[in-house]
Amino acid sequence: MSTRSVRSGCIGIAAAGMLLLSACSTNEGGGVPDAVEPVAGGGEAATCDAVAVGAFTRCENFYEDFWPEIDRQMDALYEQAKETDGGRLVIWDWYELAPEVIAQFNSRYPDLEIETQGLTYNLPSAVITAKTTGSRNTDILSGSLVSAATMTDEGYWADVDWTAFGVPAEFLEIGAPEMLPDSVNGSLMQVNVDRIQAPASLEGLLAPEYQGKASIASYNPIVFSGYGMAEGEDAMVELIGELKSSGALQVLEDQNTPLSSGDVPIALNQTLFNPNPSLAVTPFEHSGVFAQFSGVNADAGNVPGAMLWALWNAYDPDWIELRMTDEQFSTTQVPYPGLPSSVFEQATGLMKTNADALLLSLENGAEIETQDTRDEWIAITDAADAALNG
């Protein structure tokens, strides 16, 4: 069973050109409220016990001081969600939700029925088509700042004040305020450690011992974007050209098979989903790290349900513990680094492998997408795409 969720920025770059929106689209949601108000009666707002994790802010006291209020608000959202659209919750993503994930959600919220589809590259066009035709749309939007850029600019993310539902304001500094950060991903070297030791940088792949030893997929130019943000577009394009012309880097759509066999023992990619004990992941100089977000589709048919799902998936401690410790959920995304260090200390298996690599990348000064630098990331990634695939 795979529970993997792919929402990386490189995929969104390819899809961005598809997001041509109709000015005459309508919301057929009937009595769906424009906004859901938080329930009153909570205690005094909590103060974040803040620790810097790269550009992210970690609230070490999140579960002691913030979670009780979020949990209280979620109970109220559940009651509203049950009465909205017959308790129907529609979630479209790159991959459909695994039954095991839905079962965990329904173990706490049994009266909501989730309908899910995995639409891969067709996801943006499916959202747009549903809006323009008045069909039932997805309740949830998700993605990175880069992959969701056009959806953001065209107003597809509903305006939600997540702080009013207990979320620390510090969590909302990286992205747009309506985007709830739920996880993190980034560029890493996947390595067959039985065959080779990875270099500390992308330039290191130019050394003779790495000739023909590294691969990248054509759809993954964002692997070079952190380097481009740090060193400039010209230096990035030159490096990509040298890696290709020297034979150090192969463009392969199937990186996993030669990585596992050791025939091409380094794969420029992101988090690892292969449990092969010979494989590891490691950050490199100028790795790019990006937060991933979820939020409410402005065309949603069940707004409280969408809010409930987003908060549960991002922060529910029982669900987070399962993601960190239960191997059947080990290929879900690494939780948001704003959560307490204890969350990551409990990780096992593949989740530990991926979380340790991303946290080390942040510790080493990874380049991080923010709302302010989003358009620069898009331009740099477009340039990397042209250099890699042109």
Image (tube, rainbow, N blue to C red):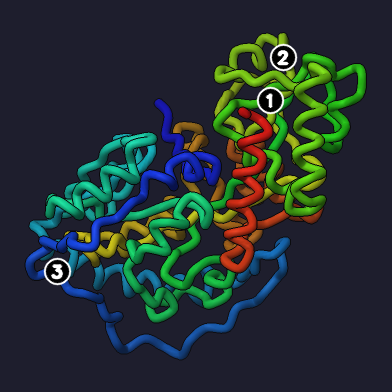
One can see residue 79 in this view: yes
Picture residue at 30% right of the left edge, 80% below the top: 38
Foreground residue, 183 or 374? 374
| Mark 1 neighbour density, 10 Å: few (under 14) some (14–19) many (20 or more) | many
- Measure how far apart labels 2 and 3 are at the Cα level: 52 Å
Foreground residue, 77 or 56? 56
| Mark 2 neighbour density, 10 Å: few (under 14) some (14–19) many (20 or more) | many
Which element carries disc 2, helix, strand or loop? loop
| Residue 32, numbered label | 3
Which amino acid is tagged 3? Val
Residue ID for mark 2: 264
* In the displayed structure image, the side of residue 89 where residue 376 appears, left or right: right
| Residue 340, numbered label | none
Q: Residue furthest front?
A: 390
Which element carries disc 3, helix, strand or loop? loop
Residue 70: x and y in percent read 40, 72
Quadrant where the image shows the N terminus? top left
One can see residue 278 in this view: no
Picture residue at 23% right of the left edge, 65% below the top: 303
Picture residue at 66% right of the left edge, 36% below the top: 353
Picture residue at 13% right of the left edge, 56% below the top: 87
Residue ID for mark 1: 267
- Measure how far apart labels 1 and 3 are at the Cα level: 46 Å
Instruction: Say if mark 2 contacts mark 1, CB within 8 Å.
Output: yes
Which amino acid is tagged 1? Ala
Residue 114: x and y in percent read 21, 46
- Measure how far apart labels 2 and 1 are at the Cα level: 8 Å
Residue 377: x and y in percent read 63, 53
Which amino acid is tagged 2? Val
Which element carries disc 1, helix, strand or loop? strand
